[in-house]
Image (cartoon, helix red, strand yellow):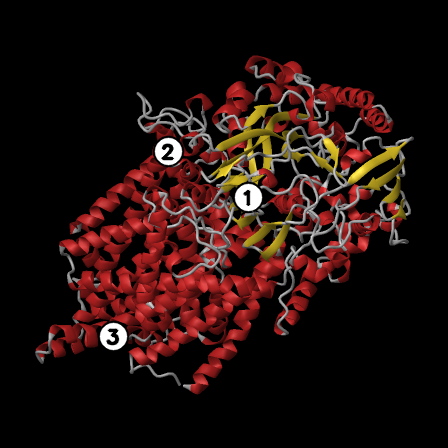
């Protein structure tokens, strides 16, 4: 077990370097950020040159990347164009997005798995069909449409929520944005649970339990659900990173100043330091979540042992 | 956790219900009571230094916390003395500035001649990377403080600035510029307290100025809380207790928040919401002219667009655009069809001349077809209008312009929009002369002078002349106008220069942009200045 | 990361092993199953209709999607214009019909690209294992770690072409790891089977084992995931348009129309309703098709 973790941690190094390099190159392709700094006016040549030097843009890309990586390892994520250290941006943005992600995942877990269990146990019944159609509709409407409509209906027409989230961004305010963010994955979790449950229903250990005459509730929770949750847990694990980084649309609609907002601003202003810094942290989160999921397997399914 | 969440939600829902029902008018904000209003804001792009701020959002704050030698009247745009008691000159090149007595910064420090001279030297100095440095380029010695073109910097201060005493300093320009005093209302010319130089980082975290508002707290990227400064010595003392600026990523969300009662003032109402605005807000909506003009510039560096008869193609395109219809349908009259290359906010005496463009700005499909045919047709058979898709409602109007051109020319593909993902990349392509075909130019005036609408955009190699249009006669007229001490004569010369722009159709004028704002029932006396920034100090709350 | 990580691969792998004791071929079984499944029949009909519309839009819409008259902006339905007009005064019906071509092209081409690239790379990695496999797994991790919308914003913001190919290329670039992982897991499981061992023992070449024995038996989960992904790619195009980096004019697509109409939802809801309705039905059809195929290929669920 310990060796497995160490090996996995070791494997993270190339993934980390690769992902940061990839995003670094991608942002670099976007071109020269200095051009946009002087508004509708061309920055004068001398100032341009100085700014390029200050942001290290006068160096070849590979050297920029190495310098950047070196700085990151010492905890220096650089400075955004408005003069704020990127670490400061992270300190304000990540807590907000983490809360948003927590809300979204709670939705996935509570609503998604419940619906999945209900439909999985009642395959082919009206409940099953109803939920099936509902989840599919959710998947097939783009998030920004769902978000804008919910904001308009709940926020303006009915006045149930505030259409935007304040800068404190408490859990209460994040319920609707969290639901919007979770919606697509929610549908996925429901369907995954349903399929997995249906498959496991006919497996030997469940049949044995049934034959022993165990109470239905116990069979469902102890025997059926536990085994069926493996793929679901996997999905949610990989989804954490996607949710945090994929909140660009949701955060924009509800005016949440989290990671998605910073990334969006960073991209619009072609701020390499911000974008790469945030993605770097997201990559770390993604890797950690994956490792965690792998370890969770062993808990859910004792047959799996990492050596 | 779920219990907590639910309880909070209930509270939140109840609170929102109260606000919606109009029971509580305690609209969110800093939590501080009193007549404080919340207003929409965008995250400033650059650090909030006066000589480093070149966009409206940063300018909004500077307008609240700084007062300059001159201030542009919020209604007429006229440059009036603010801190300056008088600015005297006999030759339009040497100026003597005398300050009024009794002005201080909100930290108690006196505003002296030195406050200005230090600030201007800082702004001009190349080592400080100030993006508005060129505003000081008329001042003698600029080329040594800020050498352009690779030279070494050989001085730290401008030789043209000299402190006489606490309340007097002199300015020597490197050339004659009669309107120089009128440019001094621009934020870059603000005075700075010693704190700015002594502890720069601390100042940036919480800027201190000499305006009617002081900054109470500033959470970068989220909000800024400003409080009216009780000790403010000027006549334009704030009539409210403070303003909380809230950052919005999307103007649409700000507008939605205004409707839901979470925001008091939203300026820059998105085009898509303009159709609803009367029904949503009734009289609580304002649409006033601002010093902004939208034009289509051409790549004169591309020989396809710079042939002998190309002027006819440009004129033809101009006549193929139904400005009337587009401003009415897309912008709900928050834009006015342009008939010259300046702005109505200048007024007739300031150089605005209604109808200067004449028939070339009037929609006429038949004339457009004829002109374009005479000019040799569209280069490559198609025009691509390049614009940045990330901000503003550019896509809306570019699509509308193209549809108008297509309809006039009877060809579905005569004109297509060419969106560029980000503003930075758009600027990259325009400044590096990579754009093929016309591109969007939006010009917001720095100061209300016709010089500012012509020289930066059409003078040979000027900083915003991205199309690289060049005309010797135009340049000569502008030089003469700048040297002219008689204002009326100068305006006349600028108008002559503008006629050359028209005859060559250096850029197609589209429309004058208005400022728009909507506000909640708590507010009254909301106005916008000619820079489309709300006049916060005049707003009354409750 | 082990193959266990992917839920769908796991399901597919079980499918592959469970079907071996059946005398009839899985595929013929599945075909019979599908033809009797109303969900499949309906979604297949919808897709056929979409393909027809994409190929011959003029057959059901007479006007041009680019002929717009601002004078008619946001008008409601009228004779000859059943869906009304959008903000630019274009006929919503015509644009919805013509939008099908772009949206279906994006969906189908992106899926084909992703499926081909992903299954070839993933399959080879699973088959040969070793260092190549380890490297590929790490590479898929790298791509997985980058949020898709973010990648789109960055990469597509520099594109100047007004064709669908950059958007498709981007989807393939960031989408292949998903399929690659599934294909790899599937191949690894199938490889354990007796008949593969037997073929190996008989001295069959690598290419023969891969093509004749492994590929046909490992392809099912890829097909299932691909059909579902197809729907999400069409929806993704709309999101990219909303962020201003999607397809460029004069392309006509549902995504462009939805993002253009969404701010106007209060004044002209019909302009939003029709393209999003068409998009939803299309995505729904592909997902249901994928679902039906999955059920048919999974004997346990019979």
The image quadrant where one finds the N terminus of chain B is bottom left
Give the chain letter at badge 3: A
Q: Secondary structure at mark 3?
A: helix
Q: Secondary structure at mark 2?
A: helix
Q: Are marks 3 and 1 on the same chain?
A: no
**x, y percent for residue C99:** 39, 36
**x, y percent for residue A59:** 73, 60
The label on residue A164 is none
In the rendered image, the vertical position of residue B289 relative to residue B339, given as above or below: below
Residues at marks 2 and 3 touching, judged by CB atoms closer than 8 Å: no
Q: Which residue is mark 1?
A: B390
**x, y percent for residue B92:** 88, 32
Give the chain letter at badge 2: C
Discs 3/1, front: 1
Would residue C12 be found to the left or right of residue C300 on screen?
Answer: right
Residue at 46%, 61% (x, y): give it.
A97
Q: CA distance from mark 2 to mark 3?
A: 47 Å
In the rendered image, the vertical position of residue A44 relative to residue A206, given as above or below: above
Viewer-nearest residue: B264 or C11: B264
Q: Which residue is mark 2?
A: C271
Q: Which residue is mark 3?
A: A226
Would residue C159 be found to the left or right of residue B346 on screen?
Answer: left
Q: CA distance from mark 2 to mark 1?
A: 22 Å
Residue at 57%, 61% (x, y): give it.
A89
Q: Are marks 2 and 3 on the same chain?
A: no
Would residue A282 be found to the left or right of residue B337 on screen?
Answer: left
Q: CA distance from mark 3 to mark 1?
A: 47 Å
**x, y percent for residue B498:** 74, 22
Q: Label 2 crowding class (10 Å Cα cut-off): few <14, some 14-19, many 20+?
A: many
Q: Label 3 crowding class (10 Å Cα cut-off): few <14, some 14-19, many 20+?
A: some
């Amino acid at each position: 077990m310990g060796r497995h973790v160490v090996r996995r941690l070791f494997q993270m190094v190339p993934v980390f370097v690769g992902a940061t390099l990839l995003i670094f190159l991608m942002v670099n392709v976007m071109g020269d950020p200095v051009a946009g700094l002087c508004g509708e006016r061309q920055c004068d040549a001398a100032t341009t040159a100085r700014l390029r030097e200050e942001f290290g843009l006068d160096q070849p890309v590979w050297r920029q990347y190495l310098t950047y990586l070196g700085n990151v390892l010492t905890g220096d994520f650089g400075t955004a164009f408005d003069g704020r250290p990127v670490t400061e941006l992270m300190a304000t943005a990540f807590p907000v997005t983490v809360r948003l992600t927590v809300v979204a995942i709670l939705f996935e877990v509570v609503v998604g798995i419940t619906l999945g269990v209900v439909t999985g146990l009642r395959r082919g019944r009206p409940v099953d069909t109803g939920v099936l159609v509902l989840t599919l509709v959710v998947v097939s409407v783009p998030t920004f449409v769902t978000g804008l409509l919910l904001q308009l209906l709940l926020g303006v027409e009915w006045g149930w929520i505030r259409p935007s989230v304040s800068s404190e961004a408490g859990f209460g305010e994040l319920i609707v944005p969290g639901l919007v963010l979770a919606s697509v994955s929610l549908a996925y979790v429901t369907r995954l649970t349903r399929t997995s449950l249906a498959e496991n229903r006919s497996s030997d250990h469940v049949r044995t339990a049934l034959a022993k005459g165990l109470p239905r509730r116990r069979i469902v929770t102890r025997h059926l659900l536990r085994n069926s949750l493996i793929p679901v847990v996997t999905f949610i694990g990989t989804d954490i990173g996607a949710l945090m980084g994929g909140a660009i649309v949701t955060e924009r609609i509800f005016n949440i100043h989290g990671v998605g907002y910073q990334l969006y601003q960073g991209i619009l202003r072609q701020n390499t330091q911000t974008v790469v810094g945030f993605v770097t942290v997201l990559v770390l989160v993604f890797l950690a979540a994956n490792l965690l999921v792998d370890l969770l397997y062993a808990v859910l399914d004792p047959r799996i042992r990492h050596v | 956790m779920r219990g907590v969440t639910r309880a909070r939600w209930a509270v939140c829902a109840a609170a929102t219900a109260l606000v919606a029902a109009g029971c509580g008018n305690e609209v969110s904000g800093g939590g501080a009571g009193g007549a404080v209003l919340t207003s929409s804001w965008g995250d400033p792009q650059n650090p909030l230094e006066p000589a480093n701020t070149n966009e409206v959002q940063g300018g909004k704050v500077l307008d609240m916390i700084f007062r300059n030698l001159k201030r542009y009247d919020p209604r007429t745009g006229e440059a009036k003395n603010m801190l300056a008691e008088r600015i005297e000159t006999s030759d339009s090149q040497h100026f003597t500035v005398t300050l009024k007595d009794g002005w201080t910064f909100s930290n108690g420090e006196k505003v002296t001649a030195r406050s200005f001279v230090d600030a201007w030297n800082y702004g001009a100095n190349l080592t400080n990377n100030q993006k508005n440095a060129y505003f000081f380029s008329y001042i003698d010695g600029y080329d040594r403080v800020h050498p352009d073109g690779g030279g070494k910097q050989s001085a730290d201060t401008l030789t043209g600035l000299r402190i006489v005493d606490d309340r007097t300093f002199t300015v020597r320009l490197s050339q004659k510029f009669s309107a120089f005093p009128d440019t001094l209302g621009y934020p870059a010319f603000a005075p700075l307290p010693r704190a700015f130089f002594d502890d720069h980082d601390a100042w940036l975290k919480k800027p201190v100025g000499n305006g009617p508002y002081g900054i109470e707290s500033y959470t970068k990227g989220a909000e800024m809380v400003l409080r009216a400064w009780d000790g403010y010595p000027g006549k334009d003392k704030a009539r409210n207790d403070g303003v909380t600026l809230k950052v919005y990523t999307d103007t649409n969300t700000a507008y939605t928040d205004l409707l839901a009662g979470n925001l008091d003032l939203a300026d820059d109402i998105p085009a898509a919401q303009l159709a609803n605005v009367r029904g949503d807000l009734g009289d609580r909506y304002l649409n006033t002219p601002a010093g902004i003009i939208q034009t289509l510039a051409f790549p004169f560096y591309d020989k396809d667009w710079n042939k002998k008869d190309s002027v006819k193609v440009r004129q033809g395109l101009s006549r193929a655009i139904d400005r009337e219809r587009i401003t009415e349908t897309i912008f709900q009259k928050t834009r006015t069809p342009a008939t010259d290359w300046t702005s109505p906010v200048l007024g007739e005496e300031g150089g605005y001349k209604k109808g200067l463009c004449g028939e070339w700005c009037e929609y006429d499909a038949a004339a457009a077809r004829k002109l374009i045919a005479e000019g040799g047709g569209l280069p490559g058979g198609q025009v691509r209008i390049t614009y940045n898709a990330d901000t503003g409602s550019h896509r809306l109007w570019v699509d509308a312009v193209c549809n108008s051109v297509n309809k006039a020319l009877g060809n579905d593909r005569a004109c297509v929009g060419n969106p560029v993902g980000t503003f930075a990349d758009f600027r990259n392509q325009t400044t590096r002369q990579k754009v093929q075909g016309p591109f969007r130019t939006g010009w917001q005036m720095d100061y209300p002078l016709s010089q500012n609408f012509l020289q930066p955009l059409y003078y040979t190699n000027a900083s915003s002349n991205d199309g690289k249009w060049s005309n010797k006669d135009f340049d000569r007229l502008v030089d003469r106008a700048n040297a002219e001490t008689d204002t009326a004569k100068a305006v006349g010369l600028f108008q002559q220069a503008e006629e050359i722009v028209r005859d060559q159709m250096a850029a197609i004028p589209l429309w004058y942009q208005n400022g728009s704002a909507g506000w909640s029932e708590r507010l009254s006396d909301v106005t916008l200045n000619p820079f489309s920034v709300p006049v916060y100090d005049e707003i009354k709350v409750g | 990361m082990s193959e266990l990580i992917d839920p769908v691969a796991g399901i597919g792998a079980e499918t592959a092993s469970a079907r071996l004791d059946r005398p009839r071929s899985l595929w013929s079984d599945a075909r019979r199953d599908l033809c009797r499944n109303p969900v499949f029949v309906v979604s297949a009909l919808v897709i056929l209709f979409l393909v027809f519309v994409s190929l011959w839009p003029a057959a059901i819409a007479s006007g041009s999607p680019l002929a717009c008259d601002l004078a008619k902006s946001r008008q409601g339905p009228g004779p000859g214009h059943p869906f009304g007009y959008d903000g630019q005064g274009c006929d919503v019906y015509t644009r919805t019909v013509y939008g099908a071509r772009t949206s279906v092209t994006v969906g189908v081409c992106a899926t084909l690209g992703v499926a081909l690239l992903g299954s070839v790379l993933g399959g080879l990695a699973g088959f040969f294992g070793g260092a190549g496999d380890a490297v590929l797994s790490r590479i898929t991790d790298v791509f997985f770690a980058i949020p898709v919308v973010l990648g789109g914003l960055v990469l597509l913001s520099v594109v100047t072409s007004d064709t669908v190919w950059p958007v498709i290329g981007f989807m393939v670039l960031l989408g292949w790891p998903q399929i690659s992982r599934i294909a790899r897991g599937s191949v690894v499981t199938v490889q354990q089977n007796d008949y593969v061992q037997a073929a190996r023992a008989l001295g069959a070449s690598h290419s023969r084992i891969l093509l004749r024995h492994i590929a046909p038996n490992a392809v099912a989960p890829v097909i299932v995931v691909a059909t579902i992904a197809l729907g999400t790619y069409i929806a993704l195009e709309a999101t990219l348009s909303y962020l201003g980096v999607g397809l460029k004019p004069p392309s006509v697509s549902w995504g462009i129309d939805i993002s253009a109409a969404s701010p106007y939802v209060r004044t002209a809801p019909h302009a939003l309703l029709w393209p999003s309705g068409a998009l939803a039905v299309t995505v729904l059809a592909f997902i249901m098709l994928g679902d039906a195929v999955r059920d048919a290929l999974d004997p346990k669920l019979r």
